[in-house]
């Protein structure tokens, strides 16, 4: 049963000339004043969803994107600011890419943010998907096995540091504290303490992409919660992922309802008719395909389709590229009247009875005014259908 409505803004600027017939991704290059404006846009949206009673506001950590799609490199610094200009909304890290951090520095920064925001920041960790980002910071991504090994060790260290008064770790990538022990004030240094640690319970989330047994088992073993869907669910593959998540818990000896400890992400658009909603969202949907397709996050795309997305002419000529109408029909995008979206969400509750949270967002390029207008329509026209449930319309409501 749905209890929480969460929001996502990935840090995009207001893009121009969008869609399959618009400017190719790698031909975009915005000036610094436009790219920096993503922080003001984040503040505008955060204030709006706080006022409208949403449970949380999530953004994404990304780097080196003059194309303007994802322009927020430090979520924890941003959230300390946003906590001072909002009242209740929780602030979710979707996600801190651990291969671009030292795990102890990430743990320290999160602890400080937790203290300064009164516990309103939600930890999130991810492996990364931009080679330009991860490889530039000196960590592997092209080598997926090495990336997974590094990520898992980093998360283990991060959770030890956040949860334990004293800890040590001696693994493949990290030796903490160093061994053989270094001398500290005349004694061998054998343990560390994170100072300070968070003063509120730490809830940690991770995105689910491939849904491999190894990845899901790791999450379950460490008590991580999962997010799936959103901009990379254009092919409607959500239910098999949810079932794989439940199976991972069963392997660990834990019986769960289907969808428990998950948040499913949806792009959405509300209008007076479904035809109008599809017409308005289509250019943004297509831009999202252009952005994510070559990153291999849309698993339904063929190599030929991905190649065709690089050029305006070939993208327009390829009639097999994803259509918003199909994603609306298979339920992976919420697009239509408020009544149609309510109906779809009630059906989702029947399909996935343990699901308590959905995360609502928009594809790259949607303006701040349009994002806020859409969140307001959803809050006023859809959320009342779920009123009276714990956390349905904001923190402590």
Image (cartoon, rainbow, N blue to C red):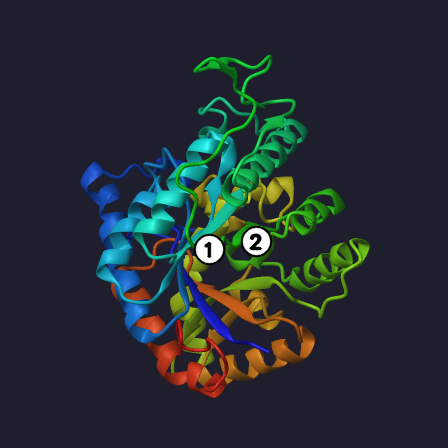
| Callout 1 crowding tier (Cα within 10 Å): few <14, some 14–19, many ≥20 | many
Quadrant occupied by the N terminus: bottom right
Q: Which of 76 and 268 is in front in this view?
A: 76
Where's residue 26, x and y in %? 40, 36
Quadrant containing the C terminus is bottom left
> Within the image, what quadrant is residue 380 found in?
bottom left
Residue 235 is labelled as none
The label shown at residue 286 is 1
- Asked where in the image residue 197 lies, by quadrant, the reply is top left
Residue lying furthest left? 33
Q: Quadrant of residue 164?
A: top right
Q: Is mark 1 on a helix, strand or loop?
A: helix
Q: Is residue 245 left or right of residue 344?
A: right
State the residue in front, 139 or 119: 119
User: Above or below — where is 260 with respect to 21?
Assistant: below
N-terminal-most mark, 1 or 2:
1
* 129 relative to 87, above or below: above
Q: Residues within 10 Å of mark 2 (few under 14, many from 20)?
A: many
x then y, percent, for residue 225 = 59, 56
Q: What secondary structure is found at the residue carrying circle 2?
A: loop
Q: Nearer the viewer, residue 95 or 235?
A: 95
Q: How many marks?
A: 2
Give residue 222's position: percent from left, percent from top.
64, 47
Residue 362 visible, this orientation: yes
Given this view, does label 1 or label 2 mark the residue nearer the observer? 1
Mark 1 → mark 2, Cα distance in angstroms? 9 Å
Query: Which residue shows up at 42% across the image and 32% down it?
Result: 105
- Residue at 58% x, 46% y is 297
Determine which residue is flagged by label 2.
Answer: 321
């Amino acid at each position: 049963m749905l209890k929480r409505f969460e929001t996502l803004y990935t840090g995009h600027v207001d893009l121009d000339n969008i869609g399959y017939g618009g400017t190719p991704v790698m031909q975009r290059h915005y000036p610094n004043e436009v790219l920096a404006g993503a922080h003001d846009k984040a503040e505008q949206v955060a204030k709006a969803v706080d006022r409208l009673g949403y449970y949380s506001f999530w953004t994404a950590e990304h780097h080196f994107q003059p194309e303007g799609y994802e322009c927020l490199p430090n979520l924890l610094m941003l959230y300390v600011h946003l906590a001072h200009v909002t009242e209740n909304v929780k602030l979710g890290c979707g996600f801190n890419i651990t291969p671009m951090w030292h795990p102890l520095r990430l743990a320290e920064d999160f602890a400080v943010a937790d203290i300064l925001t009164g516990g309103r920041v939600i930890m999130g960790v991810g492996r990364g998907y931009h080679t330009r980002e991860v490889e530039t910071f000196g960590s592997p991504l092209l080598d997926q096995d090495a990336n997974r090994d590094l990520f898992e060790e980093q998360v283990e260290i991060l959770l030890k540091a956040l949860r334990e008064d004293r800890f040590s770790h001696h693994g493949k990538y990290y030796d903490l504290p160093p061994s053989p022990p270094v001398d500290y004030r005349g004694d061998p240094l054998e343990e560390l303490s994170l100072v300070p640690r968070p003063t509120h319970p730490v809830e940690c989330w991770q995105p689910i992409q491939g849904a491999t047994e190894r990845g899901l088992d790791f999450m379950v073993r460490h008590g991580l919660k999962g997010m799936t869907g959103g901009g990379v669910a254009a092919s409607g593959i959500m239910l098999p992922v949810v079932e794989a998540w439940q199976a991972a818990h069963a392997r660990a000896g834990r019986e769960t309802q289907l969808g428990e400890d998950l948040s499913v992400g949806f792009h959405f658009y509300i209008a007076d008719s479904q035809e109008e909603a599809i017409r308005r969202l289509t250019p943004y949907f297509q831009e999202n395909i252009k952005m994510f397709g070559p990153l291999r996050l849309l698993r339904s795309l063929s190599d030929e389709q991905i190649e065709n997305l690089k050029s305006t002419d070939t993208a327009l000529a390829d009639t097999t590229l994803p259509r918003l109408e199909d994603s609306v029909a298979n339920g992976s995008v919420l697009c239509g009247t408020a009544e149609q979206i309510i109906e779809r969400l009630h059906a989702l509750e029947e399909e996935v009875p343990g699901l308590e949270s959905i995360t609502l967002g928009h594809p790259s390029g949607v303006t701040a005014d349009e994002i806020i207008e859409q969140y307001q329509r959803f809050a006023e026209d859809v959320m009342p259908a779920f009123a009276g449930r714990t956390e349905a319309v904001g923190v402590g409501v």
